[in-house]
Amino acid sequence: MRVKTMVPKNQIHCIDNYDQERAGMYKYCCPVCLRYFNHILVSSCCHNYICRFCIGQMSKKAKVNDQYVIRCVHCMTNDFKLKDVQPEDPIKEYTDTPAKFRQVNQC
C-alpha cells in the first residue's frame, strides 16, 4: 500500500455528523469511520474512499504486528495505492450518507 497525497495532515478536518450548513466544506464521507472530511483518499483498486485517520490506524497496527497486512477495506486487495480525491472529481456517495438518502426519498 502506498499513499500519495499533497494535503498535509494538519489541513485535514472532519465532523462526526452530517451538517447541512457545512456540507460544502465537509463533502467527503469515509465509509469506514462514517465521518465527513474536507479532504479524503481514494483507492486505486476499487476507487472507494478511505480517510487518512483510518489508514493511519491500519499503519499503526502493521508497525506493531509483523503478521498484519494492510489490505483495502473494501475489496481486500493488498497491493494498492491511495491518492487524493481531486476537487473536480465526482463525489462518491455511499448509501448511508445523507445526500444519497435525500435522493432516494425524493423519488
Image: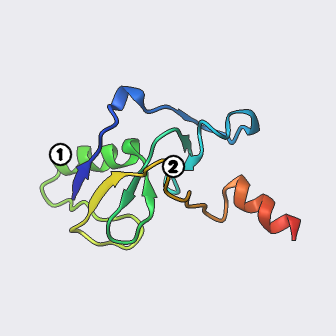
In the image, taking residue 72 as reference, residue 1 lies left or right, namely left
Q: Which residue is mark 1?
A: 64
What residue sits 25% from the left and 65% below the top? 80
The Cα atoms of the two marked residues, 2 and 1, are separated by 22 Å
Q: For the N terminus, give its image quadrant.
A: bottom left
Q: Which mark is residue 7?
A: none
* Residue 20 at x, y percent in the picture: 75, 39
Callout 2: helix, strand or loop? loop
2 or 1: mark nearer the eye: 2
What residue sits 49% from the left and 31% below the top? 13
Q: For the C terminus, give its image quadrant.
A: bottom right
What residue sits 51% from the left and 38% below the top? 38
State which quadrant residue 47 falls in.
Answer: bottom left
| Between 2 and 66, the one nearer to me in the picture | 2
Callout 1: helix, strand or loop? helix
Residue type for callout 2: Cys
Taking the view exactly as shown, the residue that stands out farthest to the front is: 88
Q: Is residue 14 above or below residue 107?
A: above
Q: Is residue 1 above or below residue 4?
A: below
User: Dot 2, crowdedness within 10 Å: few (<14), some or many (≥20)?
Assistant: few
Residue type for callout 1: Val
Taking the view exactly as shown, the residue that stands out farthest to the right is: 106
In the image, taking residue 72 as reference, residue 24 lies left or right, namely right
Q: Earlier in the sequence, mark 2 or mark 1?
A: 2
User: Dot 1, crowdedness within 10 Å: few (<14), some or many (≥20)?
Assistant: few
* Residue 99 at x, y percent in the picture: 72, 55
| Between 33 and 24, the one nearer to me in the picture | 24
* Residue 100 at x, y percent in the picture: 71, 61
| Between 48 and 90, the one nearer to me in the picture | 90
In the image, taking residue 1 as reference, residue 91 lies left or right, namely right
Q: Which residue is mark 2?
A: 33
